[in-house]
Amino acid sequence: MNKLREKLAKFMYGRYGSDKLNMFLLVILLVCAGINLFLRNGYFSMLLSSWELLLIILIYYRMFSRNIQKRYAENQKYLNLENKVKRFFGKRKYIQEQRKDFHIYTCPQCKQKIRIPKGKGKISVRCPKCGAEFVKNS
């Protein structure tokens, strides 16, 4: 067992290995395989099978690549995109949580979002960014 482990470690020396992008591609592969199991349409099943094969080839290509800088750059692009998506949905979740206790209005001049506590009646709101004043119900 140790001899096999040594041979694998020697083979992988200088190669890129696995990263978050490979894990994401693996999840996509498993989803395609799961859909393919329950789908009985021949053409669509064949299309999914070809996608699965391409994903397997891409995953192994990235894992065994010796061009570490290029694979690292690809992974960084993926991580930046993943962070943008997480921030987008995180903002939406935060706004929904704030809507329980606050009204959220947009400044008519600078489009800055301003939150006003609920239940204060008709109030004059001053934008902290541009200083514009407007009247809203709270």
Image (cartoon, helix red, strand yellow):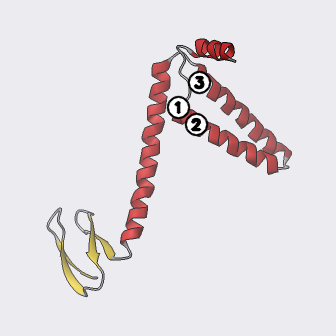
Which residue is tagged 1? 19
Q: Quadrant of the N terminus?
A: top right
In depth, the one of 47 and 108 nearer the eye is 47
> Quarter of the image holding residue 61?
top right
Q: Is residue 10 above or below residue 93?
A: above
Q: Nearer the viewer, residue 91 or 131?
A: 91
What is the C-alpha distance between the residues marked 3 and 2? 11 Å
Could you tell me if the residues under marks 3 and 2 are in contact, i.e. CB atoms within 8 Å?
Answer: no
In this view of the protein, which residue sits in the foreground, 61 or 48? 61
Relative side of 66 to 99, left or right: right
**Rendered image quadrant of residue 23:** top right
Q: Is residue 36 left or right of residue 125?
A: right
Residue holding disc 3: 63
Instruction: Look at the numbered disc 2 and give the secondary structure of its residue.
Output: helix
* Cβ atoms under marks 1 and 2 closer than 8 Å: yes
Q: Residue at x 68, y 15 (%)?
A: 4
Q: Position of residue 29 (x, y in %)?
A: 68, 39
Q: Residues within 10 Å of mark 3 (few under 14, many from 20)?
A: some
- Which amino acid, by three-letter code, is at mark 1? Asp
| Amino acid identity at mark 3 | Met
For the residues marked 1 and 2, what is the alpha-carbon distance in whole angstroms? 6 Å
The spot of residue 86 in percent (x, y) is 45, 51
Amino acid at dot 2 = Met
Q: CB of mark 3 within 8 Å of CB of mark 1? A: no
Could you say whether the residue bearing mark 3 is in a helix, strand or loop? helix
Whichever of callouts 3 and 1 sits on the residue coming sooner in the sequence is 1
Which residue in the structure is indicated by mark 2? 23
